[in-house]
Image: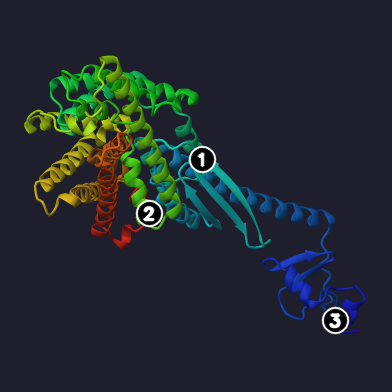
Amino acid sequence: MTPEALAKNGIIPPPSTQSSLRLDEKFSAGYFALDRSPGHTPLLDGSDERPSSQQQLDGDDDRRAELVNKIADILERQDFLMHLARAWHAFGSPVHRMESNLMEVARYLGIDACFFTVPGLTLISFGDPDTHSSETHIVRASDGYDMHRLEQVNQISRQVRKGRASVHESIRMIESLLAAAPQYSWYVRILIYSVQSFCVSATLFQGSWFEGLLAGVLGLMVGGAEILGAEHPTLGYLLNVIPPMIVSLVTTLLSDHVCFAAVPMAATINLLPGLSLAMSMLELSSSNIICGAVRLISATMTSFAIGWGISIGRSLGMAARGWTENSAGFSSYATCTGLSMWWWFLWIPLSSIGFCIWFRVHWKRWPASIVAAAIGLVIQAYSDEILVLRPISAGIGSFAVGVFSAIYGRVLGSTSSADIVFVGIIQLVPGSTGVRSFISLLSEELSASSLTMSMLSTSISIAVGLLLSNGATYSEHRRFKLGTF
């Protein structure tokens, strides 16, 4: 009989089944060992290669164990990607870069996945091309800033991609970073908030010694309220209203002795959404429409809440003083007699150190952050003196900050420059302009629209400056770099 006839009688599998069942050189099916050579039929060749039942069971167990290990390895790699996304959200990685960064890591790990990221949320869909199925995971994490741990997470990702660390060990390290205590204690952050408020009042808002001291004292209250709001979410909902209201009320009661414009903004400097506004424009400029729109709306509402709180506090202070003249709006206090710019050599490093502590930057990166902030502020200040460059002065400053951070990171081999950029651009003040615009809007002043446009123009200018700095320092061999803008 021919092999086909034997196959019809159930004696031997057909050739098509033999080819589909072969693994490596031979695959035991039933009583027969099917060889790779075409036309090979054990019975017709006279060779009886019938395995014993014990050998057959051992082979099945080995293949089952191999399959289980392979599935476990895939699941562990998927778990690593989810841990990586959660850590990047929690430690302040630029959201508009997260999708491409996660895609690069998934490609290195050999995982079929796609990602969708918005502030505080990442959707991850893992696909299985063999079964034509997929599963979607929702990774949520509160957006925060911890630049030192962000650098550590980026280092972990780099070690995995270079094969120097296993996926299992990397997951354990990321979990330990997520569960670790804050780098700086709460009382250090409150004290540094006071120092920030004092220095920012003297540099950014033209405050004198008295305005700076008042802003520093009120900054203690605002810093304590912010830390308390982080621990108790119910109180955190009122963070953008109650502290600015109290600051404005106290400043109005003392308005005979202080310049109003130099105190509320400085005392609430870390509440101002300047960084969020700049990041939203950066995301919109890089075609991350949903992410940028969400952040822009959030920053706009934050500006509105802070402006509303300052306006209400000012109205209460005027009522307490018995003032019925309501024409003395915010803009009439916009010009203050500040200290000499020579003091900036002291105030800029102090305020930059304050922002470094607030963003939890490692102390070894403080000098570079201080230099970046000084470069941005000085270039912006001198650009403001030139009429042609005044509309883009913030963009010129952010471009200089971006170029400096890129060169610094390339020289030292750093995986992230986000900490230097954050400290450098947060003092370019689009947030205070936004709050001023909403105060003017609530006061029904004609300058509200112009201040709003100034806020958006400053934010776009900063975003474009950062994007141009990326283009100016781009290199193909460092195309994939975590923590860039």
Percent x, y of residue 189: 32, 23
Q: Nearer the viewer, residue 11 or 85?
A: 85
Residue at 38% in and 29% down: 240
Give the residue at x 30% y 18%: 319
Residue count near mark 3 (Cα–Cα under 10 Å), binned few <14, some 14–19, many ≥20? some
Determine whether the residue tagged by mark 2 lies in a helix, strand or loop: helix
* Residue type (three-letter) at the residue carrying disc 1: Ile
**Observer-nearest residue: 122 or 308?**
308
Outermost residue toward the front? 324
Q: Which quadrant would the N terminus be assigned to in this image? A: bottom right
To which residue does mark 2 refer? 284
Q: Secondary structure at mark 1?
A: helix
Q: Which residue is at 23% across, 48% downward?
A: 398
Q: Earlier in the sequence, mark 1 or mark 3?
A: 3
Do the numbered discs 2 and 3 sit on residues whose CB atoms are within 8 Å? no
Where residue 397 appears, as percent x and y from the top left, is 19, 47
Q: Amino acid at mark 3?
A: Pro
Left or right? Give the position of 137 relative to 211.
Answer: right
Q: Distance from label 2 to label 1 (Cα)?
A: 32 Å
Visible residue check, residue 132: yes
Q: Amino acid at mark 2?
A: Leu
Find residue 382 and report its horizontal and vertical position in percent: 10, 45
Q: Is residue 61 above or below residue 230?
A: below
| Eye-nearest disc, 1 or 3 | 1
Extreme residue toward the bottom, this view: 2
Front residue (pair 368, 14): 368
What mark, if any, has residue 3 been given in the picture?
3
